[in-house]
Image: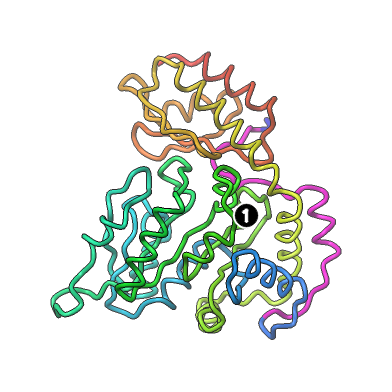
Amino acid sequence: MDFIDLRSDTVTKPTPAMREAMARAEVGDDVYGEDPEVKRLEARMAALFGHEAALFCASGTMTNQIAIKVHTRPGDEVICDEGAHIYRYEGGGTMANSGCSVKLIAGDHGRFSAMQVNEALNDPNNPHLPRTRLVSVENTTNRGGGSIWDLGAVAAIRALCTAHGLALHMDGARIFNALAVDGSTPLHWGRLTDSISICLSKGLGAPVGSVLTGSASFIHEARRVRKRMGGGMRQAGILAAAGLHALEHHVARLSEDHARAQRIGAALHRLPFTESVLPVTTNIVIATLGAGLTADGLVAALKQHGILISSIGPQSVRFVTHLDVDDAAIDQVENALRSITA
C-alpha cells in the first residue's frame, strides 16, 4: 500500500528535478572549505538573512545545538518555551553538549513576550543562580501547531536581550513557512537575531541539511564545534545542491501546503470525536481528541485507510502537509476522517 504520509514534512522524497541538480553538483572536500556547492549555499543563506556567514550542517538539531554551544558557557541558562524543539526533541543536547540549564516559559502556542523573558532572567550577581545567557525562539512553532511569531514581539525581546547582554537565537526550522504567511522577509528576522537555524529538509523538501547563520566570528567558532560533533561531511555539495534547488523552486509553493492543512483542520473541527484544533496557520495541524477516542486509536484507524499521522500525547495528534501531499490525497484524508467513529 502506498501511504499518504502526514507524520512530518521531513518524509518528502527529492523531486526528479532535485535529483538532477544533485547529480550535476560540483563537489569538493567541505572540511577543507573546497566544496563549491556548499560555499554557494552558505553564501546565499547568509545574504538572504543579512548575516555575515553561514554553515551547512546535517540537521536542524545540529545547527541548534551548535548555536547553543557557541553562545553559552557551561553553567549558563537558556530561556525558551516549554514546548521548544531544543528542549523537547533534541535528546537533552542543551544539557549534554553545552552544560546549560533551561528556564521554560509557558507561552501562547509556543510564543512568549518580552515581559515573560524579563521575569525569567536570573540576577547575574547572585552566585546561587545560573547566569542567563541565551534566549531561543522557534518560528514556526512545532508543538504550537505551526504558529508564527510577530516581528514586533521578537523586536521587543531583541531589545531586552541587548539591554542585558544576552544572545538571541531563532530555531527557524520552518521559517520559510512563516514568511509565506506574514509577508516578512528573511532580512527582517536576520536583523533581530544573533543566529538562525534554517532547515532545508522540511517544507523545502531537500533530503538532508540545515544551515546556521550568524556573524563571521560566530560561524568561525561554529565550524569548530561542528567538527567536534562529527559534522564535517566532505563532498557535501550533492546535498547542498538539493538545498539550492529547493530555495529556487520550493519556496513559492509553501502556501499550497498551508491551504491543505486548513482543509484538514476544518475536517477535524466537524467531527464529533474532536475536542479542539489549534489555529491552523501554516502546514501543521494539531488536534485534541475527546474521551471516546485516543490518539493511538486515531493513528491506527487512519493507518487502515492508508494514512499515517503522529500521536504527540495520549489525546493529541499531529498532521503535517508537505510537497508530496496533493489535493487528491487531502480528499482521501477527509473521507477517511468522516468514516471513523469514536
Q: Is residue 310 left or right of residue 322?
A: left
Q: Quadrant of residue 79?
A: bottom left
**Tag 1: Cα neighbours inside 10 Å, few (<14), some, or many (≥20)?**
many
Residue 25 part of the magenta segment: yes
In the image, residue 79 sits, relative to residue 283, either above or below, namely below
The N terminus: image quadrant: top right
- Three-letter amino acid code at disc 1? Ser
Q: Is residue 290 left or right of residue 262?
A: left
Where is residue 292? Give x, y as percent.
Answer: 33, 19
Secondary structure mostly seen in magenta is loop
Q: Which residue is mark 1?
A: 201
Where is residue 301? Give x, y as percent.
Answer: 49, 24
Q: Which residues are magenta?
A: 3-30
Where is residue 23? Give x, y as percent.
Answer: 84, 62
The image's colouring method is rainbow
Q: Is residue 229 left or right of residue 109?
A: right
